[in-house]
Amino acid sequence: EQTIKETLPPESHSSIEELYIALFKAIDTLPKRCKEVLLLGMEGKSNAEIGKILNLSKHSVEVYVTTIYEKTFCDNRTEFLSKYRFNK
C-alpha cells in the first residue's frame, strides 16, 4: 500500500511535506483529552468504544473528534488517517 507522498510527483513533495509539518504542529496544540481521543481513534476504536474507555458520553467524544478535525484541517477519520500515514 502506497503513502500519499509515493503517489505524487517528486516536484510536489516539498509543498506536501510543509502541509504535513503544519498538520503535526496542529496536533501538538490539541488539549490532552483530544489527543487521548485521537490515539484511540487511530487504533480503530469507534466513538462509542472511546467513550467507554475514557468515561465520556458519545456526544463528548463527537465534540472532541470535531475539534480534532477542525485543528488538523480534515473532514473525517479516513482523511486524517491518510494524512497521518504520509509521515510513517
Image: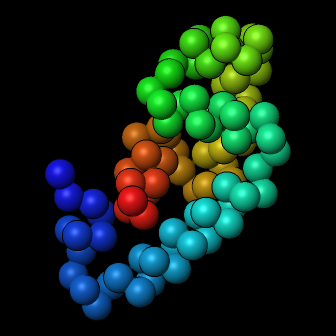
- Residue furthest right in the image: 31
Q: Is residue 59 visible?
A: no
Q: Is residue 46 left or right of residue 1?
A: right
Query: What percent of the width, then of the height, locates residue 62?
Result: 67, 25
Q: Is 79 or 6 nearer to us in this picture?
A: 6
Q: Residue at x 51, y 69 (%)?
A: 20
Q: Is residue 33 above or below residue 29?
A: above
Q: Is residue 84 above or below residue 14?
A: above
Q: Is residue 12 above or below residue 88?
A: below
Q: Is residue 55 left or right of residue 45?
A: right
Query: What percent of the width, then of the height, locates residue 36?
Result: 69, 34
Q: Residue at x 61, y 55 (%)?
A: 72
Q: Is residue 51 left or right of residue 12?
A: right
Number of numbered labels in the structure image: 0
Q: Is residue 6 left or right of residue 19?
A: left
Q: How is the image coloured?
A: rainbow
Query: What percent of the width, then of the height, locates residue 23?
Result: 59, 63
Q: Is 55 or 13 nearer to us in this picture?
A: 55
- Residue furthest bottom in the image: 11
